[in-house]
Amino acid sequence: MEYLSNLKKAVKTLRKNRDKSILVCTHIDTDGLNSRIILEKVLERLNISAEFLFLRQIDYETIDEIPFEHDLIIFADLGSGQIDLIKEKLFEIKKNPHIIILDHHIVSNEKIPENIINVNPHNDGIDGGKEICGAGVSYLFAKVCNPRFTDLAKYAVLGAVGDVQNLEGNLIGLNKDVILKDAVEFGDIIISPDLQFYGKHTRPLFTSIKYFTDVRTDLTDNDSRIINFINMVNKKHGTNILPKNYLCELTFHEKKIIGTEFLHKCSRYLPITWRIHLPKVIFGESYELKSEEFKTSLKNLEEFSTCINGCSRYDEYSVPLEVLKGDRDKNYDKMLKMLKKHKKNLASAMDFLKNDVEIIQKDKFQYFEVDKNAIKGNIVGIVAGMSYSIEKVDWTKPIFAVSEMNNGYKVSARCPKLLSFAEDINLASAISYASKKVGGSGGGHKFACGAHIPKTRDFVKYLEEKL
Ligand SMILES: [Mn+2]
């Protein structure tokens, strides 16, 4: 039952060091938080004590904050891309702890020393961008510790959805065959065929259509046209769908009708070679928690992930952790409050982008720069993804957002879904190359990645070389 190489070795190392001092470092996004929950529960169940630490990223500056004096350090949802950095640091401080990395980001090329166990799907020819996430690797680790820990599978599904691994409408590979399967069998998650509109339980269908960004049509950001469209569908099919209905309130039949009509509309706006991929951005599966209430922010995993981001992006980790563990009281209320604020911040960032920012067009991509007071680094990646609803943003090209920080710049890159299906694009290798060239570091996934750079000069030039 070893799904990935090194898993058994990693578990063995944990068991061997169970009485030593252990540190667990995880990333701060939905995937990272769920990795943390899984590892916390596993260690608790095995009666192993450990310290836990959240890391925004590992780079030349933040690596100093990691207390390497522990005997065993576990990294989850980060680490694989920074093995060379970790190696250098250990050499510099003359420490040699055991290190277990449970990650799915692209592995840095360095030769891996004896004391580092790198569990990563890329080692086994499995696509870590699409087939398993950090929480997924952590879950498989848990399952090797004890095959009965399948109640933890739901966290790994949430991590995968948080990292948009259901890019083509549904989860695939290990996500589907092992993790989702376990979560369904355990009775935590329900899979249903659905439309790929965001906000199934938290906003009217009308709003979901308005902010659909994968294809730009005459409906994008146009209220009266959306109402006309829904009226037209009702007339043609004898349905009675109201614009204010939430998607979760529609029957399967109604969803199918709306989806098919929407698909016909979208296909008229697409380059011919892209049309074949269109169904994948309109139809798909939704993953929902059986135990959560209908029309709440926690029912659908995409929306649950937004809730987590609404806290963790603002350095608030205990609130989403407690909600994940089951709190529906104080922490849940606080989460909803923070979510409201997060949405407000996103809305004002989008307004600012719309009205006050110049989008600079290059042949193969586009980019914009903002200073740190306009759009903060913690949400600039999300804003980049949402920017495709803005008219001046070319919805057929990748976008790079450059945000000024106190100590340099944060760069976030996003790629339109249909472009990623139609062409072989790798933003991660472009951003990694360009950031290295200007003295920074970066990486991530082919269609969503980021970097930290000390200066912006020539960065765009190096991007152009690679894309
Ligand atoms: Mn991840």
Image: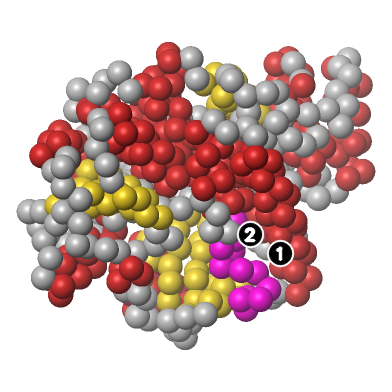
Taking the spot 39% from the left edge, 43% from the top edge, the residue there is 36
Which mark identifies residue 137?
A: none
Task: Name the residue beneath numbered marker 2.
Answer: 383
> In the rendered structure, are the residues bearing label 1 and label 2 in contact, judged by CB atoms less than 8 Å apart?
yes
Q: Specify whether tag 1 is near ligand 1 (CB below 8 Å).
A: no
- In this figure, which colouring scheme has been used for the structure? secondary structure
Quarter of the image for the C terminus: give it. bottom left
Question: Which of these two is toward me, 163 or 392?
Answer: 163
- Disc 1: which residue: 349
In percent of width and height, residue 159 lies at: 45, 39
N-terminal of the two: label 1 or label 2?
A: 1
Q: Is residue 91 above or below residue 71?
A: below
| Span highlighted in magenta in the image | 370-385
Residue type, mark 2 in image: Val
Q: Where is residue 332 in the image (x, y as percent from the top left)?
A: 64, 38
Q: In the image, is residue 4 above or below residue 438?
A: above
Side (left or right) of 374 relative to 143: right
Instruction: Kindly tell me whether residue 362 is visible in this rendering.
Output: no
Indicate the secondary structure of the residue bearing disc 2.
helix
Q: Which residue is drawn at 47% across and 80% down?
A: 408
Q: Can residue 180 be seen in this view?
A: yes
Please state which of residues 312 and 288 is positioned toward the viewer in this rendering: 312
Q: Which amino acid does label 1 sit on?
A: Ala
Cα distance between the residues tagged 1 and 2: 7 Å
